[in-house]
Image (spheres, grey):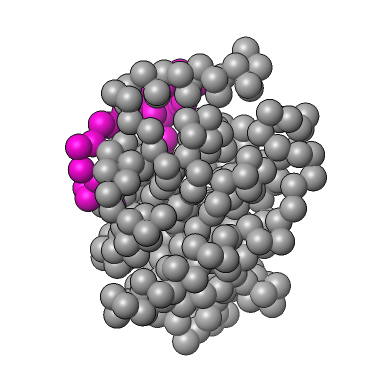
Amino acid sequence: MDNSAIINEAAAFLASKLDGRKPVAGIILGSGLGTLADKIADAVTVPYVSVPGFPKASAVGHKGNFICGNLGGKCVLAMQGRYHFYEGYPMQTVVLPVRVMAKLGVEYLFVSNAAGTVRQDWEVGDLMLITDHINMLPNALIGPNADEFGTRFPDMTVAYDSQLREMALAIAAEEGIFLRQGIYLPLSGPCYETPAEYAFCKFAGADTVGMSTTPEVIVARHCGLKVLGMSVVTDVAHEAGDDYVTDENEIIRQADAASKRMTRIFEQLIARL
Ligand code: HPA
């Protein structure tokens, strides 16, 4: 089956499970950030494994469900967990859910990730609105262009929608939530970075470092979705001479602790779309 047929079959299956719901926004919940899904009312849950063409999501802290229902008075389709390149999936699989959501008619994509910060003066638990990215993963659009979704050479000047960013900043100010802004850079993982690699990311201009997000954002922009991205800072980059280790369970715990604030911003933003 070619990729287009896989996308169409998955979209038709998912549509058949949504009881006529028409989501306007897709939400991808990163590691430890799945609790936003608890705020979705009148929800229908569809496990990824039940969707044709969708493999089981295996990453720690990722449940692997679509949750469709009402958030901020609008119909949303949230992904509790995502597919990562480091799990060994081809990029086509990593971005498959985004294309399926686009087929279902979503106009907006909200993406989140747990990330390390290379800013030594930032703190664990900080939220960072992604203003731009430096994609260090293989480009998800490599291969024959999916003409039905977009052009061969899509523009990435404003990958993260400026109006949505302004709205997010206004909401954060109103809600008294401290919201940083900066640039996200993913490396493949699955190991965390060495001090030299964190220093490299900082030198390159990044503020947060992770293992995801840019494939989905690139594909979302390719098919014309408006994107809002947020990093939740779960650890501060190690520097040469540090002797402590990055603990994946602590990262999930920190993401979970910060997820309430991220959820408030997403919910308010969706209410104002
Ligand atoms: N590096 C890469 N990915 C991550 C990190 C990090 O420090 N923290 C959470 N995800």
Q: Position of residue 93 (x, y in %)?
A: 56, 32
Magenta residue check for 141: no
| Residue for point 25% across, 31% down | 44
Please identify the quarter of the rendering in which residue 244 is found.
bottom left
Compared to residue 125, the image places residue 227 above or below, namely above
| Magenta range | 36-60
- Tell how many labels: 0
Q: Nearer the viewer, residue 86 or 266?
A: 266
| Residue for point 62% across, 65% down | 132
Q: Nearer the viewer, residue 123 or 34?
A: 34
Q: Position of residue 156 (x, y in %)?
A: 71, 56
| Residue for point 68% across, 28% down | 148
Compared to residue 142, the image places residue 125 above or below, namely below
The N terminus lies in quadrant: top right
Q: Taking 90 as reference, is 179 left or right?
A: left
| Residue for point 27% across, 43% down | 70
Magenta residue check for 54: yes
Name of the residue lying farthest toward the bottom: 121
The C terminus lies in quadrant: bottom left
Compared to residue 53, the image places residue 41 above or below, namely below
Q: Nearer the viewer, residue 8 or 185?
A: 8
Q: Position of residue 221 (x, y in %)?
A: 63, 48
Q: Taking 198 as reference, is 34 left or right?
A: left
Q: Is residue 237 visible?
A: no
Q: Is residue 146 visible?
A: yes
Q: Position of residue 245 (x, y in %)?
A: 42, 68
Name of the residue lying farthest toward the top: 1
